[in-house]
Image (cartoon, rainbow, N blue to C red):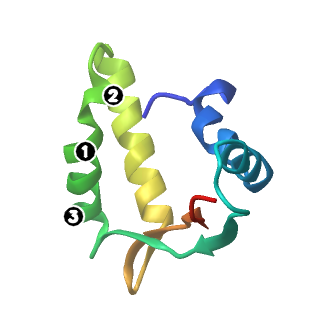
Amino acid sequence: MPRRSARDDRPVRAFRPGRARRLLTEAGFCEPHVEGLAAPMHFGADADSAHRFVLGLLDWMLNGLDDTARTRAMADLRTSIQAHSCPEGVLYPSATWLITTVRD
């Protein structure tokens, strides 16, 4: 897959709890409750099904790559998927913020 730049995680950084609290309270909401959630994300029962699943979602990222780069990206994806394979399937770590509030 194409390499991510440091700027690619801006949406994630934009909603750190402190910033989210400030944005919501300034918009007229009560003090929000912020809960961090983490759970493994299941990509498939095995490496082959996970590979098909990811390519089905993200194959557009390979557009415009020459054959060498495309082959390298596919091999990198396969390596990553195999590294995250376990008896329960292909699992990647995942986390999010659950932010709840009501209008003041």
SS type, badge 2: helix
The mark lying in front, picked from 2 and 3, is: 2
In the rendered image, which quarter is residue 14 located in?
top right
Q: Element type at marker 3?
A: helix
> Going by the picture, which residue comes out furthest to the right?
18
* Mark 1 Cα-neighbour bin, 10 Å: few <14, some 14–19, many ≥20: few
Specify which label sits upstream in the sequence, 2 or 3.
Answer: 3
The amino acid type found where label 2 is placed reads Met
Please state, as top left, top right, bottom left or bottom right, where the C terminus lies in the image: bottom right
Residue 1 picture location, percent across and down:
42, 34
Label 1: element kind: helix
Identify the mark at residue 49; answer none if there is no mark: 3
Q: CA distance from mark 1 to mark 3?
A: 13 Å
Relative image position of residue 89 (x, y in whole percent): 35, 78
Nearer to the camera, 83 or 57: 57
User: Is 59 above or below relative to 25?
Assistant: above
User: In the rendered image, which residue does mark 1 sit on?
Assistant: 57
Q: Residues under labels 2 and 1: Cα distance?
A: 9 Å
Q: How far across and down, in percent of the image, does residue 41 sit? A: 43, 69
What residue is pinned by disc 2? 61
Instruction: Find out whether the residues at labels 1 and 3 contact each other: C-beta distance under 8 Å.
Output: no
Residue 73: which quarter of the image?
top left
